Image (tube, rainbow, N blue to C red):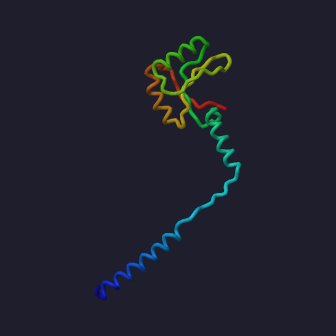
Amino acid sequence: MNRFQFKNIIFTLVLSCMFSTFLKAQTGQATINQDARITQLVDLHSKMILADKLSDRYKIQLFSGDATTASSTLKKYRNRVGTWSSSIKHETPNYKVWVGNFRNKLEAERALIDIRKTFPIAFIFKPAR
């Protein structure tokens, strides 16, 4: 083995020891201290979304009138279109068939295009809470 090869081997060993020390120094753990109320707030927010308590949503109304026609309209919607959630709401004296829970007006307008093929008097609204 000549002197040049020996220097290269020594240099490679020293360099690899330095990098392995550097890499070991970069590993570690991070500890996150989180207030317990954050978890409660996230749970409450999820429940409010599921219960439809947030007012920043849009809906589409298919019908407003008597209970019998509202029920038949809901069945017709579920059989023909049925893509979005639907329900009957009672606001004295009328029963209303509402569809969807859209995040913005653009989503509601896209859905309205499909719904108006079957329900031409449907319209978009933002429920008051």
Q: Is residue 10 above or below residue 70?
A: below
- Which residue is painted at 58% across and 62% down in the image? 29
- Which residue occupies the extreme front position in the image? 1
Residue shown at the point (59%, 11%) measured from the top left: 68
**Residue 52 % position (x, y):** 62, 32
Estimate the x, y position of residue 17 in percent, counting from the top left: 45, 76
The number of numbered badges drawn on the structure is 0
Task: Please name the residue shown 64% across and 17% down the image.
Answer: 94
Place residue 69 in its image quadrant: top right
**Residue 113, image x, y percentages:** 44, 27
- Quadrant for the N terminus, please: bottom left
The residue positioned farthest toward the bottom in the image shown:
3
Residue 48 x %, y %? 65, 36
In this rendered view, identify the residue nearer to me: 128 or 80.
Answer: 80
Instruction: Give residue 42's quadrant in the image.
Output: top right
Q: Is residue 127 above or below residue 79?
A: below
49 or 38, which is in the foreground? 38
Q: Which quadrant would the C terminus be assigned to in this image?
A: top right
20 vs 115, nearest the viewer: 20
Front residue of this view, candidates 2 and 58: 2
